[in-house]
Image (cartoon, helix red, strand yellow):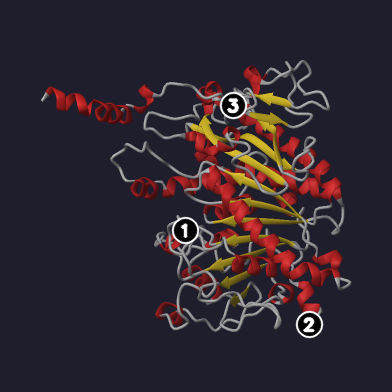
Amino acid sequence: MFAELKGMMPLLALVGCSLLFSACSPTATLLDAHEGKLGIRDNELGSDHRAFHSILHFPHGIGLNFPGYIVGIEKAGQNLIGGPRVREELYPVRGDAEPATHRRIRSNSKAHFISHVMKYSTGIGDHRVFGGRIQPCAIYSVLGSSFAEPNLTEGRVPDGERTLVGSNQFEFCEGFPRNESGAHDSILMPRAYHQSGEAIMDLRSDINRHANRNKFTHILVMVMGWNTPQSNAVQNFNSIMGHLLDEYEDTYQERCTKTDLEEICSFHPLVVGVTWSSDWQLSSMSPIPPTVVRTASFLNKANDAEEVGVTWLADLLRNGILPARSELADDASGPKVVLIGHSFGARATLAALVQETFHEPAIKSSFNEQFQPGDTFLALQGAFEVKELFKERDLNKGLSAAFDRDGLRAVLTATQFDKAVKFAFWADFAGSLDGFDAVCGDLPGDEVDCFEVGENTQRNAELDRYGLAACVTNEDPILLETRATKPNFSHASVLESDHGLIYVNTSRLMNCNAAFTGGGAHSDIYRRETARFVMDVLLPRPFVETQ
């Protein structure tokens, strides 16, 4: 008997170690100290908050495959980061007139803040093996800053030097980090909330330097949705952009250079990906199934998305992206601004556009006026109520002033095969056909243009179709049931529209499940056919004028 137990000892030790994992693995990571001070490492329930800044732990393993930036927004205790709940002198209460979203921000024990901004560029360092490889560096990071070498006396790394953080954990870009005193521990952490505005200003100045060297035609701001840790969000950014670049290079580039339209149909984008703490998770040893945890988080994360929108996403657009574009060119010759939001990412983006901003609500109108013709808000399977697009949240009172044919235009998709938005049965969500019907069924034609990606949709007679009904048949009962009487969407639809809102029933295009995701076709946005649709939204002109 004893011999049998002795033989089982290795197995029992492994089981015991699994049950008491933290006790068996006490070794710290290089960023533990700052993660602990901010409370964004883990918690008593086993949640691992490092999932929302994983690019700092693996800067070469997780990152963009092309030039751009990632802005990481996380959530920490207001007392630890100097949030509005504890700094009322900076963020005064507005009384009964304050919107519900603003009241939630003040009452919550935690607040969102920008914890890091990473840059991805081919212009960093002397790469002697692969000359054009993408290299990451940090423009801003609360985490790891005190490990910086050399010791900062002026708050800025001397030009020509890069700061190695945490024994080469990640590098600061040339000229960064920057703050008034260089005292990162005593300044950045208790002021991390307020300091997030400085992170945006640093990003703005670097975009100008970056763009002046590269002549970008578009600035794409991407925000992903619910249950998307940072590594997944980066994967999604790479998937969307990879297909867009393939589509442009294979289909558009040659045609553009052969015509006199090269100026207006070029596509050389700069990507700014925004990640946020979009999901709940418990320890892998928790008896509660992950699906139950995620479902229970729906309303909480819906609120979080709006809070991200009215705080740092609105500030990023108003004080970062749009002024940077104006500084590059004060007329329509500058890069177009394209806001791509998926699911709750679209919800956050819409909140930034139509709700009062938390930090400077009085200048909301001038914020919207910074948009120019050709700027686009693309809501891919948006997880927000369609009435948010209209004045006073009423479909009968006209489209929100945020959207205009000669300013920022909104383009929405909806598909019958999205099971995630159907979960919100109490409302008409934008990504659902209920939302599509609510807007396109009753509203007059002077408010919105509605289309369907139909059976005969083609970009051009010489080009492939959209890959319709890829995961269903054309005779699928659901598909037949949802066949609309709306015009077919084509390359000309956006160009010919006279309205600020374009709504597209994409049931025949978006009907596949993306591997490793839930919600039916909710995430069917990461393939070449969807990229063709997006390119027709962004660059419709060459194919219209050269037929």
- Assign a secondary structure to mark 3: loop
Q: Write down the quadrant of residue 350 in the picture.
A: bottom right
User: Marks 2 and 1: which is nearer the front?
Assistant: 1
Residue with the mark numbered 3: 87
Q: Which amino acid does label 2 sit on?
A: Gln
Q: Is residue 283 left or right of residue 379?
A: left
Query: Alpha-carbon neighbours of circle 3 within 10 Å: few (<14), some, or many (≥20)?
Result: some
Image quadrant holding the N terminus, namely top left
Residue displayed at 73% across by 15% down: 151
Whichever of callouts 3 and 2 sits on the residue coming sooner in the sequence is: 3
- Assign a secondary structure to mark 1: loop
Residue displayed at 70% across by 83% down: 461
Q: In this view, does 268 lie to the left or right of 69?
A: right
**Residue 86: % across, % down:** 55, 26
Residue with the mark numbered 1: 515
Whichever of callouts 3 and 1 sits on the residue coming sooner in the sequence is: 3
Q: Which amino acid does label 1 sit on?
A: Ala
